[in-house]
Amino acid sequence: MLNLVIEPLQYGFMQRSLVVAVVVGVLCAVVGSYLLVRRLALLGDAISHSLLPGLAIAFVLGINLYVGAFIAGVISALLIGWIHTRSTIKEDAAMGIVFSAFFSLGITLITLIQKDNKIDLNHFLFGNILGVTLTEVRDVVLIAIVVLVTIVLLYKELLFFCFDTLGAQAAGLPIQAFNTGLMILVALTVVASMKTVGVILVLALLITPAATAYLLVPRFHQVMGLAAAIGAFSSVCGMYLSYYLNLPSGPAIVMVASVIFALAFLCNPDSGIFSRLTRRHSTPNQQS
């Protein structure tokens, strides 16, 4: 049994992949907890799809792809907020408009680039964690430190803002700044997750661990902690499944997270489907 755990660790690519997977699993779960309570799950999907034009343009200009992706993510987040505040368009509709436009632009640019360059940018769609380099490991760790330190420093303010926006505004908190800041944190998180699960599956890693924890524990700090543990566990299990069963790593990580959510949804002692059925069957027997 111990050999099954140790064997993959003899390879450098697996060591790098596991580090990135755990960091991204924790990061996505923590940031996703805020999106869950703000009911902004679609925001992660919108920003993740909006990164593609930045990737393509960064490749053409010969600059760091992460920088291009982050700039595109921030621009898309600001556009969503601008459309929402400057018109009667609801925020979810603004997200749909922006991410559709950016995604289609990104696909178009990537297609044009591939005509003249033998480079595959499509792995950013589905992830390529087994190909991460030491430089990319460093970038992901730095992004995670920036995001997590920001959350720790602004924990109380972000908590107030997410659960009671009107109350936070009345208390004098800069609501628009916090809204924009949260979008930037999401953009950074999505950028860090590109090589792990890709922009297509990043929403699952953002929301699924947080949603699972939300079913199991009552307090927000507990949700964040448990979600981080689930995210890390899903990432490690997904990587080992990928290694031994020859599965794509990103989808394997998401599948593990989804199975954990399904178990929590069905077997949660308080509100799980199986628990409710058990109580329904036991109540008549007790009455009789």
Image (cartoon, grey):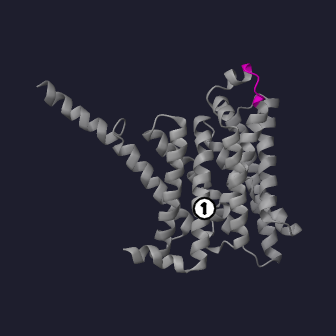
Identify the residue at the far right of this view: 61
Which is nearer the eye, 78 or 179? 179
- Quarter of the figure that contains the C terminus: top left
How many numbered discs?
A: 1
Can you tell which quarter of the image residue 172 is in? top right
Where are the magenta residues, as a range? 170-175
Instruction: Locate residue 213, reporting x and y percent.
Output: 48, 43
Q: Residues within 10 Å of mark 1 (few under 14, many from 20)?
A: many
Can residue 96 be spotted in the picture?
no
Horizontally, residue 101 falls left or right of residue 245, namely right
Which is nearer the eye, 286 or 228? 228
Element marked by disc 1 = helix
Instruction: Locate residue 286, reporting x and y percent.
Output: 15, 28
Which is nearer the eye, 160 or 54? 160
Instruction: Locate residue 59, reporting x and y percent.
Output: 82, 68
Which residue is located at x 78 percent, y 73 percent? 114
Instruction: Locate residue 14, reporting x and y percent.
Output: 57, 74
In the displayed structure, 280 sits above or below 141; it is above
Identify the residue at the far top of this view: 170
Which residue is located at x 61 percent, y 59 percent? 23
In the displayed structure, 211 sits above or below 165; it is below
Q: Which residue is mark 1?
A: 197
Q: Is residue 234 magenta?
A: no
In the displayed structure, 168 sits above or below 199; it is above
